[in-house]
Amino acid sequence: MSEGGSIIPVELREIDHDYLFNVVLKRQAIAIDKKIIPPSEMIWGGIGIGKSTTIERFAKWWLEHLKNKGIDLKGIARYRESEQYGRSGYLSLADIRLSQYLAVDFRGIPDKDLKKIHKEEEPMPITRWNVMDLVAVEEDSYGIMFFDELNLGAEEAQKAALEIILDRRVGGVKIPDTWVIIAAGNTTWHTGGTSEFLIIQLMDRLGHYYLRPPTADEWIRYNMQYEIPHPIVTAFVKEHAGRGVMYDVDPNALYLRKSTPRSLSMLAKKLNMTEWAGIEQGSKEFEKVLVYEAQSTIGAHWADILKDFYNAIMKEKIDLDAIWNDPRSARIPEQLGSLWYVTTGMISRFNETYEKNPKEAIKRMLLYADRLADLGSGRYEGGKFVIKSTAHREVGTVVFQHIAPKIFSSEESAPLEGLTKLDSEVLALMTKVCNKYEWALPPDVREFLKEIETEKQETIMPERKRRRRVTV
């Protein structure tokens, strides 16, 4: 069993989502930059672990990558959702569930045309094929064809898709060399009942990667950045990370166990929607909603555990608003579950405030991260060096990595564009916190901080020299 919770034959090695994104997918785009046709790949993994999500993330990255190379693209056009699909001014994205297609869908519907074989002959009917809209794309377009559930497709449908996946053509239409083709499917050891059948031509010519479910830390980072996090769910995932919560599926009893990264994200979204509707945490109505919604998304087994966890959090009487309004001195809990609960709530408030007042939002989160660093640092107590709390240090790192892009990126659409817009108080606080989390920063940011510190020292030293008393 991997850290993420999947079960896999010992002779197979799993990849994580970072490897899938940064190596398997990104190199496809780099190959196209060099006018090399990238090979098609196959991603295996359990249901709901983020295969489709990673493809979506790659599409957004590739769009920005192409724009940076001077290719004028207006956005992402999705298959059967946008009329711009297949056009050269857009990055096209097709998510094809092969289990829903027949062979005729790919080969097209036959039609007749009149054509002379020899000049002297009368025109005779010739069969032509009306190709499907999936492959009716412009020659100079960029795009991604993602064949999901490839192994669930009927044998004839797989054979029809084979021509696209391997030969980049169907009938008389050729897929441009500037398109990425990726396939995915579910394995029997993840689901207990999904067919792994692929026709031999696909099995032999595709590269096969086995994707493990994300760890709790990976899920939390992604959920906070791209989804709608909820403090209860985030804290619950972190607390029960080692007990299988990230991936626990019983195909024969889904009402009991169907906890996956996707279902946990769905639960977080539902609980947020509940609060938006006016049902507040701590109320009897919210507890009832929590149990019903948890059962509907992650199964009765985990719903019961979540209910007990929620009640334990509520007993601590944590005031998120008080911590947000006074991050310097308000009480911060010691328990890991409660700490993640607070942190998710703080990040939610940061995102809301940042749209209206970026400086204030950054200042409060820097104060919070600074406090966590102090609580998580080593110190001497009773003559002995004691690590106060590794949990606070770990959570502080996640907090800091969440807000760092807002500070350092010059491409933010918000009023802040980099450090030059920070006032002296926030800049000093930022430098202080960055030094405490230096190991968690990207290399370019570390170099930038060294430059700031050097400039600061060069400013201070002449002042000290002027103040030095010279005696004879």
Image (spheres, rainbow, N blue to C red):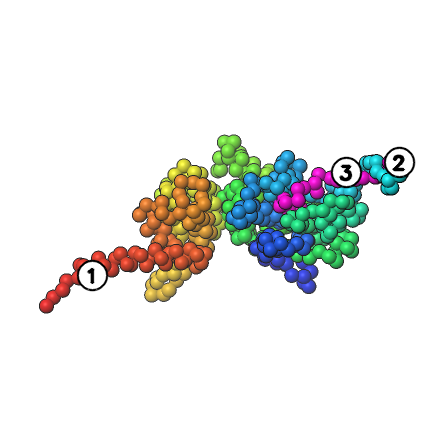
Q: Which one is in front in this view, the residue at disc 3 or the one at disc 2?
A: 2
Label 1 vs 3, first from the N-terminus: 3
- How many labels, in total? 3
Rendering coords of residue 434 (x, y %):
39, 54
Disc 3 marks which residue?
130
Q: Which one is in front in this view, the residue at disc 2 or the one at disc 1?
A: 2
Visible in this render: residue 467?
yes
Could you say whether the residue bearing mark 2 is in a helix, strand or loop? Answer: loop
Quarter of the image that includes the C terminus: bottom left
The span from disc 1 to disc 3 (Cα, nearest Å) is 83 Å
Label 3 vs 2, first from the N-terminus: 2
> Which portion, as a residue range, is magenta?
123-147
Disc 2 marks which residue?
122
User: Residue at 41% across / 61% down in the picture?
Assistant: 387
Relative to 141, residue 391 above or below: below
Disc 1 marks which residue?
465
Amino acid residing under circle 3: Asn
Relative to 111, residue 424 above or below: below
Amino acid residing under circle 2: Glu
User: Residue at 86% across / 40% down in the picture?
Assistant: 119
Visible in this render: residue 146?
no
Amino acid residing under circle 1: Lys
Packing grade of label 3 (10 A; few <14, some 14-19, many >=20) is some
- Residue furthest left in the image: 472
Relative to 169, residue 442 above or below: below
User: Residue at 75% across / 54% down in the picture?
Assistant: 202
Rendering coords of residue 423 (x, y %):
32, 45
Q: Which one is in front in this view, the residue at disc 1 or the one at disc 3?
A: 3
Packing grade of label 1 (10 A; few <14, some 14-19, many >=20) is few
